[in-house]
Amino acid sequence: MREKSFVITEENADEYIQKIGAFIRDVVAGARRRGVVLGMSGGIDCSVVARLCQVAGVPVKLLLMPDGEDMRKTTSHRDAMELIDKFGFLYEVCDIGEACRAVENHFDALEMLSGINIRPRMRMIVLYAMAQNDSLFVIGTGNLAERLLGYFTKWGDGANDLNPLGMVTKGEVRILAKHLGVPEAIMYKPASAGLFEGQTDEEELGITYAQMDDYILRGSSGSAEADARIEARMAMSRHKLEPIRIFGAQEMTAS
């Protein structure tokens, strides 16, 4: 991973909102896209990215992708709609439930994690279909801690055309959220990937985002046990951040 070259604080947050917005605008314009499409879960990361696009003047369409009635019954749906209503975002809803069941029903026995990962991969299929159809880019929302820990689904929520938060810690995301006017209900709720009912990131990881931020910024979380857990996950998930290995490619590059 490239060394983190900046730190976002309360004092410079507005400056970085402009810088990140310019990055989004330049990438989208450089590829001659009309804007971006963003998978909206009602979480803080996607809410911050949506607002960064809006502030930068980049057209953004939010796509809510429930699995049947699951999202509509949760606080996540309420939070997503609060953000949409507050800032007037354009949005669509695409129910992925039937498509997910079609894949799941193909297997006589499906290992739990394989089944869980079908949903984020199905959502990415929908996002890229919309992006190609409307000449948009798929914008990512994963923060730096999630990238380092590999806490994303390969070819699912880890797939995107640009990622404005990929070098931003969770604490920095919260600072940006405050300055962008993200509703408090979104800012302070426990982070969740929405993989299953009651799931939270920190409980599943066994590491808090504060510990991960300290590890990134200071070299240690302050706990030898947490540091060991972080480093083990980083090593296990390194393949998610590496380019696809192609036979003969290294020789061609070297020549």
Image: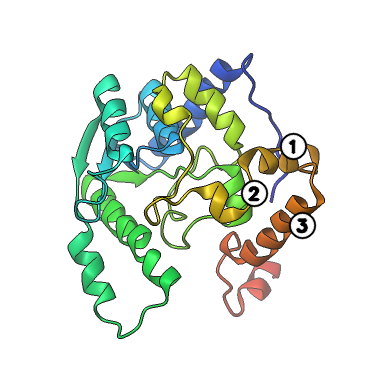
Q: Report the residue at 30% width, 51% height from top.
A: 127
The extreme front residue here reads: 198
Q: Which mark is residue 228?
A: 3
Residue drawn at 28 percent across, 39 percent down: 77
Horizontal and vertical percent position of residue 186? 41, 30
| Quadrant of residue 29 within the rendered picture | top left
Mark 2 or 3, nearer chain start: 2
Question: Is disc 3 surrounded by few (<14), some (14 to 19) or many (20+) residues within 10 Å?
Answer: few
* Residue linked to disc 1: 217
Q: Position of residue 243 (x, y in %)?
A: 58, 64
For marks 3 and 1 on the same chain, the one whose residue lies earlier in the sequence:
1
Residue 102 against residue 151 in the figure, above or below: below
Q: Is residue 101 above or below residue 26?
A: below
Label 3 element class: helix
Q: Circles 3 and 1: CB distance less than 8 Å?
A: no
Ranked by sequence position, the earlier of labels 1 and 2 is 2
Label 2's element? loop
Q: Is residue 156 left or right of residue 84?
A: right
The amino acid at mark 2 is: Ile
Label 1 – label 2 distance at C-alpha: 16 Å
The residues bearing labels 3 and 1 have C-alpha atoms spaced at a distance of 16 Å
Q: Can you tell which of label 1 and label 2 is closer to the viewer?
A: 2
Amino acid identity at mark 1: Leu
Residue under pointer 2: 207
Q: How many marks?
A: 3
Name the residue at 44% across, 52% down: 199
Residue at the location (68% across, 28% down)? 7
Front position in the image: 153 or 222: 222
How far is disc 2 from disc 3 in space, using C-alphas? 10 Å
The amino acid type found where label 3 is placed reads Ala
Q: Find the residue positioned furthest to the bottom.
A: 108
Colour treatment of the image: rainbow
